Amino acid sequence: MQRLTGIGVSPGIVSGRAVILIQREQVLRYHVPPQRLAHELARLEASRERARQQLTDIRGGVALRRGPDMASIFDAQLLMLDDPMLVPRAADIIREQRANAEWAIQRVFQEFSAVFDEIADPYLRERKGDVADLVGRLKMNLRPGMATPRDLLRELDEASVLIADELTPSLVAQIDWTKVRGFATDAGSRTYHSAILARSLDVPAVVGLYDASRVIQPGQLVVIDGSADEVIVDPSEEVLARVARHHDDRAPVSAAGHDRHGPAMTADGVSIRLDANIEFPDDLAAARYAGAEGIGLYRSEFLLTGIWRGATPVGPVSAVNNEDQQYEIYRSMLEGMAPGPVTVRTFDVDEDQLARPLADGWVADAERAGRQGLRGLRLSLARPEQFRVQLRALLRAARHGRLRIMFPFVSGVEQIREARRMVDETAADLARRGEPMARVPIGVMIEIPAAAYTADLIAREVDFFTIGTNDLIQYCLAVDRADARVSDMYEPLHPAVLRMIVMVRRAATRQRIPVSLCGEMASDPALLTLLVGLGLTDFSMTPAAIPTARQVLAEIRSEDFRALARRVIALPTAQDIERELHAALGGLLAGRKT
Ligand code: PEP
Ligand code: MG
C-alpha cells in the first residue's frame, strides 16, 4: 500500500482500477546510423501519408455535420502537409544530423514557432496552433503502437479511476463521466478549472500529486479520497472497507426534505439567491436539477475549447467568428433557463488560447490561470471585430429569455465605457436591421484588485457586479492559483480578501446595483456562511454545491453571522478567522465535506 498526498478538490472516496493518461511526452533525440537513414525517412513519409488519410476522414465527417466553414480548418492542415518547409525540411534534418524522425519534426516546429512569433498580423500568428496540431499528429503517427488520449478514454469502464498528468478542459469535455469514479492528476490546484469541473460533476478528485501518473501502473487498484487529500495505491482491506462504509452511509441530499426550488432561506428568514456556474450549454440540466434560480456565470469561452460534451466540435476560429452558431447556443440556453436569468460572461481567454487548434485543446490550466496579459475584456477590445460578433449573437438572443452580459478581467472604467459603447453601437445596428431588442443589463466581474478598489467608480457605469474571488484572491495575495508551491498561501479567509469583498459589496449597495459572488469560495458551505455574514445575499456556484448550500443556509441565522463577520474582520490572520468561524458553526458542518 502506498499513500500519495495532493489537494482534494472534489470530495468523496472511491476505489477503482487505474487508467493512466499521459499527454506531456518528451521527444528524445537519438542517433540514426547511416544504414538506417532510409528506414527513418520512410517512417517520416509513412507518418505523412497516415496524417493525410486521417485528416481527409476528419474533414469529411466535419463537413457533413458542420458544413464547409468548419471543414476548412482541415483543408489548411492538408495543404501544410505538402509544404516544403515541413516534412521535406524534417527529412533534411534526418539526413544532415542523423537524427530520428520525431526529433526532426519537433525541430521543424521550433523553427516554425520562432517565425510565427515574429509575425505582426495576429490572424497569421494564430495559425501556429494549426501547425502545432499537425506536428502533434505526425509525431503520434510515428509511434503507431502508442495509444492516443481517445484510445485510452475508450478503456474506461464503470470501475475506472482516471490518473493523468493533467486534464485540459477539452479533454474533460471528451470524457464520459458516467464511466469515471474519480480522478487524480499530477498538476493542479484547488481552483484549477478541471477541479471546478470535477466538483460540478460530483466526481471525487485529488490534484497536485506531482508524479501519480508515473507511480501508478495501469490496472492497479487505487483509492481516491478527495475529502482527505490523498490517493492510496494497492489499498489494504481496511481501507477498502472504509470506502464501502462511506457509500452505504451516503444518503441523498434531498432526503433532508428541503425544497429544492425557489430562493434559499436562512433560519431567520433572509432569502439567499443561489445561481449556477456552468461551462457547457448542456450543464443547464444539472443546474436546474440542483435548484439553481438562474445561471450566474456561463463561462462562454468554453465554446472555444474545440470540443464539448455531447455536441459536435466547434473550432476556436469558427466559433469566434460565427455569429449564427453562437446565437443558437445562447438562445437555447436562455430558453432552457427561462424564466430564470442567464449571465453570459464574454470570452475570458488570452491570445494563445484563442489560437489553439481543435485536437490540441487549451494550454494547460496551470498556464492559463496565471495569465495577466491581454485577456478577457482587454482582448475583446483589442479584437473589436470578434467582440462585435459575440455581442451581436448575444443581443439577438436576448429576446428569448432574461440575458445579462458580463465582462471579465476589467481593471478600469475606461474599458467599461468602451465596451458599453460597442454594445450600444451593436444594438443600434441591429435596430437598423429591423431587430430591436429589450435593454440588456451589463455587468462586470470584480476580480482584479484595481476594480475592487475603484468599485465605487465602476458601480456608476454598470448594472451589476459579480465578485470573482478565484482571480481576486490570487491577484490580491500575489499567489498564482495554479502554482502548487504557493497554493497553501491561496487563502480565501485572508483579512485583505474579506475587506475587499466588503468594499465591493458596500459600493454596490450605495449605488443600488445587485452584487453576487461566483468564485469557488461560495461552494464551500463554511465560507458561504461567512459571506452571508459580510452582507452578501446572491451567489453563483457549481451546481453540485447548491443542495448542500441550501441546507446549511436553512440552519444558520444570518444575524448571528453578521455579528461574527463584524468581529472577524478585525482579526489579524486567516487562521484566527477560521477558528472563530468554525466555533460559530459548531457541529453544523461536522461530517459534511464541502
Ligand atoms: C473568478 O475569477 O472567480 C471566476 C469565477 O472566474 P474564473 O474562475 O473563470 O477565472
Ligand atoms: Mg476569473
Image (tube, rainbow, N blue to C red):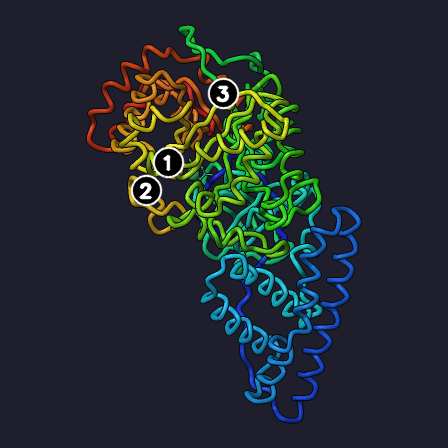
What's the residue type where badge 1 is placed? Glu
Question: Total marks drawn?
Answer: 3
Q: Are marks 1 and 2 in contact (CB under 8 Å)?
A: yes
Tell me if I can see residue 63 in this picture.
Answer: yes
Q: Which residue is mark 2?
A: 475
Quarter-of-image position of residue 140: bottom right
- Is the CB atom of the residue marked by disc 1 within 8 angstroms of ligand 1's nearest atom? yes
Disc 3, SS: strand
> Mark 1 or 3 closer to N-term?
3
Q: Secondary structure at mark 1?
A: loop
- In screen coordinates, is 494 left or right of 219? left
Q: Nearer the viewer, residue 357 or 423?
A: 423
- Residue 29 relative to residue 522: left or right: right
**Which residue does the image show at 43% across and 6% down from the upper left?**
269
- Residue at 69 percent across and 88 percent down: it is 38
**Element type where label 2 sits in the image:** helix
Mark 2 and mark 3: Cα distance apart in space: 26 Å
Say which mark, if any, is on residue 274: 3
What mark, if any, has residue 447 been given in the picture? 1
